[in-house]
Image (tube, rainbow, N blue to C red):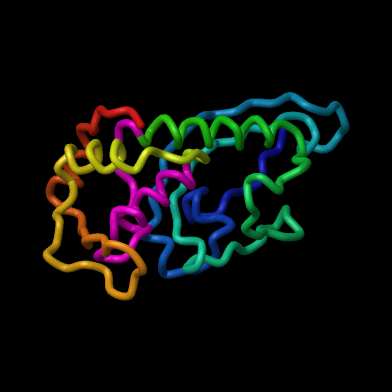
Amino acid sequence: MPIPKQTKKPLYYRGFGQSKYSCYLFFQFIYLYLLSAFTLESWMFERFITVGYTALVDFTKVQPVADTFSSACEWSNIHNITEMILDHQGILEKALLNLRVQLNYHPVGYNLLPEKFTMPELQKLYETILDRILDRRNFQRKIVGTGILKRLNETKKGVAHKAPFYYKFDLRKYQKALSSGMGFEL
């Protein structure tokens, strides 16, 4: 069975074009999928092997680009995706589940938030990924307890109620948490 030649770029760069931001993306392998789907004569319709990755990116800085096999490539709200070909719905669901489980073990946010950010901004990032509301006090207690944050002596200006403090990541502790894990459950 003939297999098309691959480009010299790693697979995960496809669809993200030549963006200089690509080198800062967080990628994680999730699963290797094999699907025997059709019995037509072309190699494209006999068997599919898909390598699944999750990627955390700032979608405002990365513009998806269609590859040779796609007519379009764009960002979509996960709740608005209706129909996908072959086993792609299952791949998306597994990727999302994997990402949500990983939040309990590895920190996120370093490349997705500004250098200094408020606790509500960090919590909103976690809530977006988990697709659920988190208790503010429990979230703050757990995330501060990991030791990956430094509280700054500066508060956000121009807010209606009590101004939240700014935080920044302690890069050394953040890297350690990435390698050894955090071990808490949200």
The residue that appears at 21% across and 67% down in the rendered structure is: 155
x 65%, y 54%: residue: 76
Q: Measuring 78% from the left and 30% from the top, which residue is drawn there?
A: 46
Find the residue positioned furthest to the right. Answer: 40
Q: Is residue 42 left or right of residue 97?
A: right
Front residue of 110/8: it is 110
Q: Split into 4 quadrants, where in the image is the N terminus?
A: top right
Q: Residue furthest bottom?
A: 158
Query: Where residue 21 appears, x then y in whole percent?
Result: 41, 66
| Left or right side of 34 for 179 | left
Q: Which residues are magenta?
A: 104-129
Q: In the rendered image of this protein, does residue 159 appear above or below residue 130?
A: below
The residue located at (20%, 39%) in the rendering is 177
Image side of residue 150 versus residue 117, left or right: left
- In the rendering, at what x and y percent does residue 137 appear? 29, 40
Depth order, front residue of 28/44: 28
In percent of width and height, residue 27 lies at 41, 46
Is residue 71 magenta-colored?
no
Q: Compared with residue 56, is residue 153 higher up or lower down, i.e. above or below?
A: below
Q: Quadrant of the C terminus?
A: top left
Q: Quadrant of residue 113?
A: bottom left
Q: Is residue 114 left or right of residue 94?
A: left
**Magenta span contains residue 120:** yes
